[in-house]
Structures are given as C-alpha cells and as structure tokens.
Amino acid sequence: MTIATERHCGIAGIEWSRHEMNFQDFVQAWARKVSGPAAVWNAVQRVLTSLRSLAPEQNVSRLLAASVVVGLIVGAFVSVLEWIVLQLLLDNLREQPLYIAAVAPMVGLAIGTLILRTFGGGISASTSDEYIRAYHQQTPYLRGRDLMPRLMSGMATIGLGGAVGLEGPAIYAGSMTGLRMSGWLRKWLGNDYAKVLLTAGAAAGVSSLFQAPATGVVFALEAPYRDDLAHRALLPSLLASAAGYLAFVTIPLVEPEAVLPFAFDSGVGSAQLIGAVVLGVGAGFGGRAYAWCVRRAKAIASTYSKVNTVIIGGAVLAGLAVLSDSTVGDPVTLGPGLHVVDWLLEDNHAFTAVLFVFVVKALSTFVTVGAGGTGGFFIPLAIQGVLFGSLVGTALDTLDIGSTNQNLWPVIGLAAFLGAGYRTPLAAVMFVAESTGGGAVVPALVAAAVSQLVAGPSSVSTGQLIERTGLIEGKANSPVGNVLKPIPLSVPPDSTVYEFIHNLAIGQQLKTAPVVDGSTYLGLCTISLCASVDRDLWNETTVAEVMDTEAPVGSPNWYVRDAMVAMQQGGYDMLAILTSDGIFLGVVSAEDIVRLEEIIEVTT
C-alpha cells in the first residue's frame, strides 16, 4: 500500500511532499521520531507533573518541614534537660544521707523562687498552663525572656526533690520553640501557623520526655480543652512528635527506660471490666479532689509571702520525706515519683503501706505547688493512678473478683486517674498503650471513660476551655464593654412615630433605638412597634406610647455572651446597658458584636 499526496502533511514532525511512501516505512519513521530525546523529556515532564499534583500545597510542605525541625530541636533539648535534672541532680540526691535529701526540696524551692523573682522579674511558676493560655489567644504569644527563668526554676525545683513533673518545663520549652520558629519563618510560612507550631512543639516535648510519640500528639491536642480537641495541628504535631522522639533516642545522654515496667496477661474478662468500672468511679472522684487541691495550692502560692511559703513548704516536704523513709523504708515523696513504681514492684506491700504512699505523695505535690515550685502534673497524676490502681486491685483480690495478675490494676488506674485529673483521657489511654504494648487498652478505655463522667468539669489546668468555639462564640467571654456604644442614636420620649420612622428608620437605617429622657433610659422602640400604629396617627402618637418598657437590659459587669443571651431571649438586636443605679451607659447591638469579630479577624 502506498500513500501519495500533493500537499504538506505532518504527523509527529514527519513531512513529505510530491512523493510516494510505503505505509510501513511511514510508521517506522514516526516511531523513530517520537522515541527520541524530546519524547523522553516530555514523558518525564508528564510524570513530574503528576507527582507534583500529589504533593501538598507549598505552604503546607513548608509547615511540615518546619514541624520536623521543631521536633528535632525540642527532642535534643529535652534529652539534655532530663539528663541534668533526673540523672545528674535527682538520682545523686537520692543517694545522699536522709538529712541532706530531706532539706534539699527547700533549697530547690528557694533557688527557684529567687530566680523567678530576680531574673524573671516576678513571673509565675506556671509552665504547661502557659502553653494552654497562649493557645487560646487570638495571636499566640509567649515572652522569650521568660523561658530561661522558668526552666532554671523547674530544674532547681525538680532536681532537688520537688514533687512535680519535668513535663511542665518540657512542654513550655517545646511550645516556645514552635512559636519562635513560626516567627522566624513568618515570611516563608505566612502568618497563619503560629498556633499550629506552638502545638507541635508541645507535642514534641511530651513525646521526647516519655519516649511516647503518639501520647505526645494526643496530649498536645487534648490539653487546651476539657471536652474537645485542638484542630489544624494533627499532621504537624505527628511529625514534630516523631522527630522529637528520634532526636531524644539518638542522643546518648539518657538511657531510654519504660515508665510502666509492668508485665501482665492481656486477656480481658468480666473481672477486668468490673475492676475498670470501679477504678473509673474512684479515680473520677479522686481526680476531682486532686484538681481542687492543686487549684487551692496555686491560690496559696499567689497570695502569701514567697519567703513564708518556701520556708513552711520546705519544712513540710522535709517532714514528709523523713516520715515516708521511716514508715516504708524509702523517701518516696522526693521528686516526680517515677521511683515509686520501682518501690511498688520490689515486694508485695501491704494495703496500708500503699495507701500511706498514695496520701503522702499527693501531699508532697500539693505542698510543692503551694510553695511556688515549677513543674507539671502529668507524672504526679500518673503515679497517683498507679498507686490507686494497686489499692483497688488488692481490694478486688480480697473479694475474690480481681485479676490473677495484680500488675494490670496499676496500669488501668493510671489511665483513669491521669485522664480525670488533666481531662486528657485519650492521651492517658495512649500512654498506657505505648508503655505496655497495648495489652491493657480495653479496660483502660472503660476506666478512663467512667472517670471522665464522674470527674465533671474539674481539671488541674486552670487555662483549659470546655470546648472549641466559633468566631462569635470565641469572643463570648470578653467584657461587654468591648462592644458597648456609649453615645448611641437615641430618641426622646416625646418624638412622634413619624419622626422615628423618617429620621431614624429611613434616614439612619436604624431598626431599633433606645428611648432616653436626659440620662434616664425608658425602653426600646423598634420599627415594627411603630409600624403597628395606624398611618393616620403617626404624627399624633409618641414613641413613649409604643416603646417596650419590658425589654431586657444588661449590666456593665456582663460578658458578651450574657448580652447575646439576653437579646436572643427578648427577641431584640439591641440591649441597653445600665449601672446598678439605673444610669444609662449605652447600648450593645448584634451588629457591633459581628463588627468586632470582623475587626479582630482582619488584624490578627
């Protein structure tokens, strides 16, 4: 077969004119042409285009890369921090004679308080709460110069025997690192990722400290709320947490060890589930009481003289150390409490001995906080849960309804008590799963769920919100003065309905206006009330005759949410604000609330 043509034709760049070509020769020539370098390059380009379509957006890629860097920095830092505090200071302290070890917490509290008052300029001892407060700010902010004073105070408090956890300084350092990274890379990342990197840094701090990456992620997402999760930060927190863990285990300063070295049969039966429910109920009440005591201790620390609290608190801690050493043969009140697990596993201790340690360990934490100590509550709550679980397990075994392996109950108790005290049930269960290989997850879930129901709204963290809110709801907790209009368009009581409609409703597009006589508020007049009057009587009827004198009024002490509720219940879009003496201060309108939110959204 031949192909003949009198015109130029082109297929894949092959042209011919006024000649005959065998069809097979034409196909072979075309194949040689498309298989050349240009075709290969085009194919490569198509593959690269397809791969690029699968990649995340540029800003997201940058955010994830920044999260990894944050995790690596935090993991390396926490490794050094743990080596200094737990191995260099606390482990050596426990080897000292009892009279030295007992006095050391007072010295640590004194050093920590002095650092906060001098180098810190009088800042508080809070650490993980600072992360939560910063998270709830429109523009997260942590003052950089506060980092070293709080870290040094925490090192002195915990390293010299204070009964609080190192996770507080670790979370604070991690969140500060993430926030600073977002500032340094603002031009590269944009302005929208400060809160995300703040959360990622906190996750890396927990992950590297406990060698539990999943726990770090879940805790950082759960901590800001009691009944909700932080959003937008999941993937960055996962990467930062994993990077922090890798950095921690790579640096050979600290030998990784299990926080919960319990071995048990992972089988789940009716005895385990019954025990989990009992543990959940008890831990719910216990976590509630623990949170109340922590809040009272914080109030004491902020109210009374620092010198008196350090001296009295240090003396009480010394007495508790001596008492515990003479009673159970170990000063278990010193430090966060990880060594309590070793004590518990040494021998089959009597119920009364474990109960004694449960009480004095909690007291030592409350006293440390009340004396102004710097640290967290993750490990103290976990240790209380381990002890409580051991107590419940012993009681169930006595009643012949317990598990044949008593090591299961401390693990379940940890999940229930930690979840109830910090209001982080998922993080507590994840910590159990990572620490024990998943053998106790089902009863731990049951215990954590029950403890949440019993614990109510209590929490050791003072900065947690109940749940995530929307734009308007997010400003509901601000003072009503933020949206108060002190000189509103008002109408005197002798104005006619005609004047209201033409001057305010039509002229000013105002549907509602307060009726004010001098400085005295009389009621609200609306266009719907005026429209109900016969048109022929508009010039004869005054607004005083149609106004609503029963319309709700608000107080200057209210929050925006109170004003919103009052307007909704009264069916008005405006609320008059009066003092307790009845003096008219101005009005709050739904339009002003929306406008405030729009301004905040643009400027933050």
Image (spheres, helix red, strand yellow):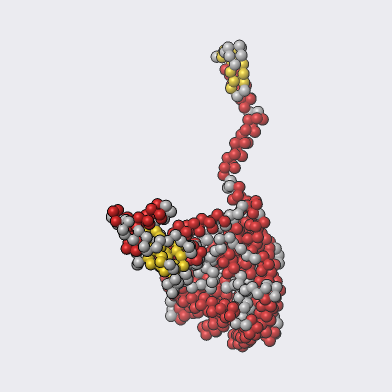
Q: Is residue 213 above or below residue 39?
A: below
In the foreground, 448 or 533: 533
Q: Quadrant of residue 497?
A: bottom left
* Quarter containing the N terminus: top right
Image location (x, y in percent) of residue 542: 33, 61
* Quarter containing the C terminus: bottom right
Q: Which residue occupies 58% across, 14% down? A: 7
Q: Quadrant of residue 386?
A: bottom right
Q: Which residue occupies 66% across, 78% down? A: 113
In the foreground, 598 or 450: 598
In the picture, measured across the screen, residue 397 lies left or right of residue 155, that is left
Q: Which residue occupies 60% across, 36% down? A: 46
Q: Which residue occupies 71% across, 65% down? A: 252
User: For the image shown, how many numbered marks are present on the structure?
Assistant: 0
Can residue 277 be spotted in the picture? no
In the picture, measured across the screen, residue 390 lies left or right of residue 181, that is left
Image location (x, y in percent) of residue 485: 48, 62
Image location (x, y in percent) of residue 421: 51, 73
Can residue 251 be spotted in the picture? yes
Image location (x, y in percent) of residue 68: 64, 56
In the picture, measured across the screen, residue 109 lies left or right of residue 50, that is right
In the foreground, 243 or 438: 243
